[in-house]
Structures are given as C-alpha cells and as structure tokens.
Amino acid sequence: MRDVTTAQPLDVQPTPLALLLLGREADPKSERGVECPGDLPSPSDPDLVARARAAKEKLGDKVFVLGHHYQRDEVIQFADVTGDSFKLARDAAARPEAEYIVFCGVHFMAESADILTGDDQKVVLPDLAAGCSMADMATAEQVAECWDVLTEAGIAEQVVPVSYMNSSADIKAFTGKHGGTICTSSNAKRALDWAFEQGEKVLFLPDQHLGRNTAVRDMGMSLDDCVVYNPHKPNGGLTAEELRAAKMILWRGHCSVHGRFSLDSVNDVRERIPGVNVLVHPECKHEVVAAADYVGSTEYIIKALEAAPAGSKWAIGTELNLVRRLANRFAAEDKEIVFLDKTVCFCSTMNRIDLPHLVWTLESLAEGNLVNQIQVDKETESFAKLALERMLALP
C-alpha cells in the first residue's frame, strides 16, 4: 500500500480552461468579463440616485448614456435614450459631440457602438463582466474551424454567413470578410433574402432559433432544410452529405432567457388566462413561436402593446425587466400583461449593470478617469463595419 504520509505531491498544472473556470485568469477574447478596478459604492447607499444625478450633471454634454430595454429600472432612469442594441449603437453614432458613450447593456453592444462611433469618442461599459451567453457560444476560432469544415465538404463557396447582431465583433468581422451581412430580429428575413441571392446556403450565427424561425415561419422552408452545426463535435456533428443537402446551417447557440420558454408555458398561460394573446420574441424555440399568436422583435413587442385595445390580455415571452416595465406602463389602460413563464428569469449578464456600477462609472468619468473602455482593433472594426454596412444597405 502506498504511504500517503510520505508521498510527494503530484506535479499537476491546471489548464488555462480550468483557471478560467476557477476565476483565476481572464480570456481577453471572451465576453465573460474581468473584474472592474476600483471600489464600487455599496448597493445599500441611500445616496446612489443623487450621486448618479450629480455626476451626470457635472459631465453635461460630454456623456451620452444608452439604456437597453432589458436593463433594470434603477439604471434605465439615467438613460438618455432606450432601445435595442442596434438602435442604441446608431443613436450613439448620431451624437458625435459626446466624448463618452456609457452603454448600459452588454459587451457585444458596446463593441458595436465603438465600431459605429468616431475615433475621438470613448465607449464605456459600466461592468466588463456584462457579457452575453449567446455571443459567447461562437468564438472566432470555432467559426474559422467551421469554415474549414465547409471548405472540406466542397460548399464554402456556396455559403453566405449571416450573423445576428447579438455576436462579438470578431464574428461580425468574419461575416464581413466572407461576404456576409449582419441582421437584427426585425430584419432577419430581409437579410436572408439578400443572402440567398448571393449564394445557395446560409451559415447563420450564433442563434439557431432566430435562424430557424425566420427560414421556416417567414420564408416557407421546411425543418429538413435546416441542420445544426455543433462546434463542440467533430465536423460540427454533421456529415458532408448533410451539409451539402442543407439550405440553412444553424450555429448551435441560443439566448439563455428566450430559450427557457416552452410549449408548456404557452399551454399553461392559455389555460390560466382565457382569451390571452401570446406574444413572443423570435429567439424562442420553434415550437413556442409556432404556438404563439404574435412573434416579433423587442420594438415590435412594445409597439404591439401600445396599439393593443384597453382590456386586452397579453402573455409576453421576453426578458422580465421589460415585461414588468410594460405591465406597469399600461396598467392604467386596463391592459393585463404577464410574463409567459411562471419562473422568474432576468437576463443575468444584463443585470450586472446595476446602480453602483453606473455611479462608479459616472463619478470616475466626472473626475477625469477613463474606466472600462471598450475598444475594437482597427482590422476587426473595418470588416465588422463592412458587414454592418451591408445590413444598412438591405432593401
């Protein structure tokens, strides 16, 4: 028997992945984030609102605060504009006089703002750990490997990449470099129509559900026209024959919030609330979208509720902060608005942008200290901008 009292310790070195998972290292290519420097105010500080107002007032026109729809109310109250990710990036580009763009959203959104704003403007993310699980599901290395697989299958020249706005700058750059375009949840059909005019197949990144729902629901394809490429399996888990037969090659990615909604959620809410209208985001699973009454982007959801008649009932399948805000907003009009699922589900990474981080950011900028700047390198920016410009040129 081995003498454990005298045995020498094993010389085991943790792998880079193990260190990352343990939180002891940071991957600069990942959207998982790193620690914020400096000391944050206490979340229990009763003066946080006053401090944020004072710092923002001191900065004046030098700062422009963007607030994504999924942000919590305590943060949204300080936003100069609110909207979805692409609208906010364009709003930032339309404010060249603002020296600082404070993006209350997640990492890929701040990257898009940096791509679209001037070189003299600084884009700041209050918490660098505010990433996006969907965007993290497609790395530049994985997508390059996928392209090699498509090349070996003899179809790369037929494939046009279409990447969802909810992707990293690296993925947007890959898309631009390979002749593709970006899309939003509002213009995904237009982007796919354009792509199929350029080639015979589409590689859709990184949200499989938006790609599938647009192809099948909006364009009349069949589910058999779609295959799912899994970057964690050899050759994506697909044969060359399957790749050659497919029209839509869907990346195996999804939104952690919208992916939670199920067909049971839809059936349950219809049973609980007779006459309810089910309105969901196209990032939801195909069976959820097929069972819903209405499907559309965040902006579509807001406009649909604005136009809804008094007394109508709605179950909304999107992020809870927005649903709760809409429910409060339209309560006076006797519109009943509920969350589609019984389980509370905020976007956990979006919620990393809280009032203490915003106060710390604004006070730091007011004192002349630039913090948490998001910068996209020039080569990546040029190809990513090319893909974005193709989207802007869509008919």
Image: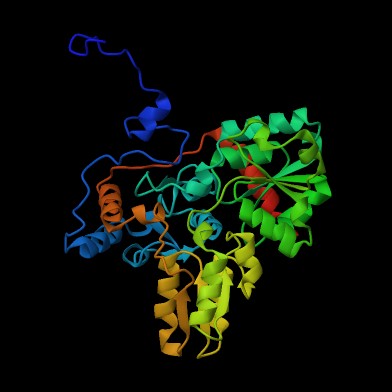
Instruction: Reply above or below: 79 against 231.
Output: below
Q: Residue at the spot x=76%, y=39% of the render?
A: 243
Q: Residue at the spot x=33%, y=33% of the render?
A: 22
Q: Where's residue 281, x and y in %?
A: 57, 65
Colouring chosen for the image of the structure: rainbow
Quarter of image, res 74: bottom left
Q: Residue at the spot x=46%, y=43% of the render?
A: 120
Q: Where's residue 4, x and y in %?
A: 22, 13
- In the figure, is residue 107 to the left or right of 25? right
Instruction: Reply above or below: 50 against 98.
Output: below
- In the figure, is residue 231 to the left or right of 153? left
Residue 176 visible? The answer is: yes
Residue 379 visible? The answer is: no
In the image, 110 versus 95, the foreground residue is 110
Q: Where's residue 297, x and y in %?
A: 58, 65
The single residue placed furthest to the front in the displayed view is 1
Q: Where's residue 195, x and y in %?
A: 77, 49
In the image, 95 versus 375, the foreground residue is 375
Q: Quadrant of the C terminus?
A: bottom right
Quarter of image, res 143: top right
